[in-house]
Image (cartoon, helix red, strand yellow):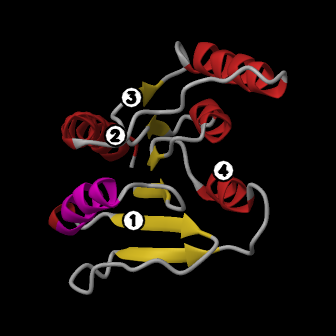
């Protein structure tokens, strides 16, 4: 069982929550990015994976290496869709859980908004990441991790 973080844009608060859990539960955790990222010195199970620079290289690394039943954190909807299709548990930094029941709708809305922006329509971006988002993430992460660990132990 591993935890994957699409780390280029993951908020520091998200990484801190995951680092604490990884250390406490001794779960291998991988931060995948196109540059080396700092990892806690007291948590050897957390490591940074550097991929070559390029569009979606980190995403493809995660897709190719993540296993069904593992957990991933990403705000990237196309990546989330590919991981959900593989049976990976996926949550975003605001605590939203992506599932086979909701990912197609979320991806469709994202594509629609991209099309709108492509025609020149101004759309609002995401709200700044705040304390409420951190709490929502922490709660969702704890629930999802417990579920993933339970299933992983049964299948091991």
Above or below, comparing residue 24 to residue 83 in the picture = below
Marked residue nearer the N-terminal end (4 or 1): 1
Element assignment for label 2: helix
Element assignment for label 1: strand
Q: Position of residue 137 (x, y in %)?
A: 28, 39
Name the residue beneath numbered marker 3: 96
Above or below, comparing residue 81 to residue 149 in the picture = above
CA separation in Å, label 1 and label 3: 20 Å
Name the residue beneath numbered marker 2: 148
Q: Residue furthest bottom?
A: 41
Of tags 4 and 3, the one toward the viewer is 3
Name the residue beneath numbered marker 4: 63
Above or below, comparing residue 32 to residue 39 in the picture = above
Of tags 3 and 2, the one toward the viewer is 3
Q: Position of residue 32 (x, y in %)?
A: 55, 66
* Foreground pick, 65 / 152: 65
Name the residue beneath numbered marker 1: 29
Residue placed at 36% from the left, 44% from the top? Answer: 152
Element assignment for label 4: helix
CA separation in Å, label 4 and label 1: 15 Å
Which region shows up in magenta?
A: 12-23
* Foreground pick, 44 / 32: 32
Q: Are marks 2 and 4 in contact (CB under 8 Å)?
A: no
Q: Is residue 139 left or right of residue 76?
A: left
Marked residue nearer the N-terminal end (4 or 3): 4
Q: How packed is label 3: few (under 14 Cα within 10 Å), some, or many (20 or more)?
A: some
CA separation in Å, label 4 and label 3: 19 Å
Q: Is residue 110 left or right of residue 120?
A: left
């Amino acid at each position: 069982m591993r935890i994957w973080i699409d780390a280029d844009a993951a908020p520091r608060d998200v990484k801190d929550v995951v680092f604490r859990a990884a250390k406490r539960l001794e779960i291998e955790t991988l931060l995948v990015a196109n540059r080396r990222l700092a990892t806690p010195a007291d948590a050897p199970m957390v490591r940074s994976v550097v991929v070559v620079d390029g569009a979606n290289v980190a995403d493809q690394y995660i897709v190719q290496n993540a296993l069904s039943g593992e957990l991933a954190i990403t705000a990237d909807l196309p990546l989330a869709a590919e991981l959900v299709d593989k049976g990976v548990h996926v949550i975003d930094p605001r605590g939203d859980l992506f599932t086979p029941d909701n990912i197609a709708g979320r991806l469709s809305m994202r594509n629609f908004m991209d099309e709108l922006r492509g025609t020149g329509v101004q759309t609002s971006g995401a709200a700044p990441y705040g304390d409420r988002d951190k709490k929502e993430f922490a709660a969702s992460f704890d629930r999802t991790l417990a579920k993933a660990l339970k299933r992983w132990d049964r299948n091991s």
